[in-house]
Image (cartoon, rainbow, N blue to C red):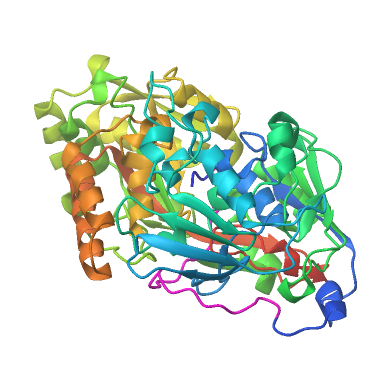
Amino acid sequence: MRLTKTMRWTALAACTALAISACSTSGGKSATDQASGGSGKKGGSISVELGEPQHGLVPQNTAESEGSEVLNALFSGLVEYDNDTSVPKLRVAESIESPDATTWTIKLKDGYTFHNGEKVTAKSFVDAWNYGANQDNAQEALPFFDKILGSDELAPGKGKTPATKELKGLKVVDDKTFTVTLKAPFSQFKTMLGYNAFFPLPAAFFTDPKAFDDAPIGNGPFQIDGKWEHNKQIKVKRYENFPAAEGKAKLDSVTFKIYEKLETAYNDLRADTIQITDKLPVSAMATVASEFGDRYIYKPESGVGYIGFPIATNPAFANADVRKAISMAIDRESITKTIFSGTRKPADDFISPIIPGYRKGALGDVAKYDPAKAKALFTQAGGLPGNTMEIGYNADGGHKEWIEAVGNQLKANLGVEVTYKPFEKFGAILTALGDKQYSGAFRMAWSMDYPSAENYLRPIFSKIAIDNGSNYGGYVNEEFEALLAKADSAKTDEESLKLYQQADDVLIKDVPYIPIYTYMSSAAYTKTVKNVKVNAQGQMDLANVELA
């Protein structure tokens, strides 16, 4: 999932990413305790920081952090990830089973309804997935359905028309049961199902998808209150018919207050105008721990920050040695210590350090700061036309300081004149890249959609992710594609992981993006709230927040 702001994502403890337990999230509390939070003040309202989402609030068309933050409050999926351990556990699903990792049977719990009263059924999921997998609907989550049998017919590629309206691998058995048949074994399929691409949709969505953008009808602990007020706020309120045993929201309502600048949000937090922010500006790093004490959340998370290259549209960046030289000319240690006050760590792999499959030091010389070697390689590779380079970044996320630090290092170590292209919002740079309207280097970041090494490879660097995903560089390597396919079909978890690591090695050789740093979670909250946590996908667990 694309990171839109600084310090966005939360911890993902290393886990098998396979086993799903059938425990509920309620802990056995009564319905009264669920609503009031037990020891906290009953009800109440708070405001939290948010950036403007890129698209409408449709789960199958949301692949960035701000929209996903809201969807996490409005929807409940088949699976969720534990706040502290990242272990996947069942949510709407009562069971998810397969004898061969190819054919899966999914049974649903009773009691879940959409916010318009419609019952959540197997059809709710099957219809939603068919919609997301149909290329005519141009949903950003389309690549996540590629493993399901029949996806090729529903998404045959650019210039071709889908031959069907439904995935042949999806079958509704009854209201509570559906089956999924994959093209090949994929042991991590259960883990994927916590991602918002696999959320259900009510029948009302298909009547008027456009209206759904601003007023989605979910099945989660909160429901929309009015409509999304663009660039201002999104209000939600507790859904009173949410199953008590699954954990009703404790607060009466939450307002997602939309900010363009993190500094403004942080000042509002200090004034208690908003009560939680899970993104902090660079300017706050030196003092936030002393000011907020134990209300400052600081821990490793799954995000990786990059400098990306538009390989497909700008021949200047086509030579891998040029990209390697740029990488070796960047002092990651200095940037993470000086710019980020130690709240980020130098990256040494394309895979996050807290994801199974990460290898310490995997990038090798590519990530080793060596100005002399970088200059020699840069010169040998022919350098850049005009000895100039532009770096684009979103100005709404506190990226100016570190991007300019990178530029200064490249000028000093490679003799390159670096200019900068700030985009007002993250959505703007994504649109420019997606439409092939921007051809400079660019700031990008990624955090897991689900805890798997595969999720750091396919959604960012595969062919299918060029038109339906986050491959903004247009990178293509057939060896990489073949290794992903082999890893997906491996018979054991160990074999699969080794093959994903081999695919990672191809990226290290080609350097389509330059990993710069890994994220540390930095969030803060006021004295007026308690039980504040950030879940495994980097989103606030708002259903369990209560007034202090």
Q: Which residue is drawn at 32% across and 40% down?
A: 461
Residue 541: image location, x then y, percent: 67, 64
Q: Can residue 339 be seen in this view?
A: yes
Q: Residue at x 39, y 34 (%)?
A: 153
Q: Can residue 280 be seen in this view?
A: no
Residue 286: image location, x then y, percent: 58, 58
Looking at the picture, tell me which residue is in the foreground, 385 or 538. 538
Image quarter of residue 17: bottom left
Q: Is 356 positioned to the left or the right of 223 in the image? A: left
Image quarter of residue 361: bottom left
Residue ranking furthest to the bottom: 28
Residue 71: image location, x then y, percent: 66, 50
Image quarter of residue 414: top left
Where are the magenta residues, as a range? 4-26
Please tell me whether residue 16 belongs to the stretch shown in magenta. Answer: yes
Q: In this view, does 512 lie above or below 12?
A: above
Q: In this view, does 53 lie above or below 180?
A: above
Residue 524: image location, x then y, percent: 67, 62
Q: Is 285 positioned to the left or the right of 40 in the image? A: left
Q: Is residue 177 above or below residue 266?
A: below
Q: Is the magenta stretch mostly helix, strand or loop?
A: loop
Residue ranking furthest to the top: 386
Looking at the picture, tell me which residue is in the foreground, 307 or 263. 307
